[in-house]
Amino acid sequence: MEKQLSSPPVVLSEQIPKPLPIPKFQLGQAVKWACVPTGDYGRVVGIVFGSEGSIRALGYHYAIALDTSSPSYIDGITSDWGFEDDLELVTPNPTAGDRLEASP
């Protein structure tokens, strides 16, 4: 059975700068969390400018569809939000087909 993609909530900011800065990542790009030990990775499927409720980080937040081989996917987490400063680009591994492989 295919797991359904669901994204946790993010809070839209009351203070949106004009003009908006250019986002660091684009839809469809492969990214990984650079600052967490789990090493989760996936593809950008959404972008919002807002502030996350628990840390009050103002800026771009990216909805990430986790790759099926990402560590948290095994635990049933199929998506997550990542703050721009916490993410970095990864490149697909051509030997793994369509699957992403994040290097440590």
Image (cartoon, rainbow, N blue to C red):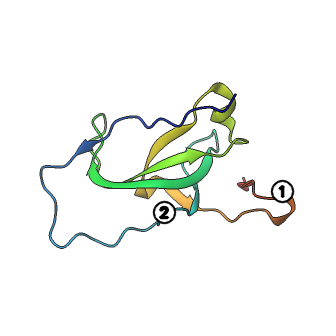
Residue 25, relative to residue 67: is it above or below? Answer: below
Helix, strand or loop at disc 2? loop
Left/right of residue 62 with respect to residue 75 in the rendered view: left
Quadrant housing residue 84 = bottom left
> Closer to the camera, 83 or 5?
5
Asked if the residue under mark 2 is in contact with the one under mark 1, i.e. CB atoms within 8 Å, the reply is no
Mark 2 lies on residue: 27
Q: Which label number is shown at residue 30? A: none
> Closer to the camera, 64 or 35?
64
The amino acid type of the residue labelled 2 equals Leu
Residue 59 appears at what percent x and percent y? Answer: 29, 57
Q: Mark 2: give few (<14), some (14-19) or many (20+) Cα within 10 Å.
A: few
The mark total stands at 2
Residue occupying the point 25% across, 41% down: 11
Residue occupying the point 57% across, 31% down: 77
Residue occupying the point 43% across, 68% down: 24
Q: CA distance from mark 1 to mark 2?
A: 21 Å
Q: Earlier in the sequence, mark 1 or mark 2?
A: 2
Residue 74, relative to residue 65: is it above or below? Answer: above
Mark 1 lies on residue: 96
Helix, strand or loop at disc 1? helix
Residue 7 appears at what percent x and percent y? Answer: 44, 38
Residue 93 appears at what percent x and percent y? Answer: 78, 62
The amino acid type of the residue labelled 1 equals Ala
Q: Mark 1: give few (<14), some (14-19) or many (20+) Cα within 10 Å.
A: few
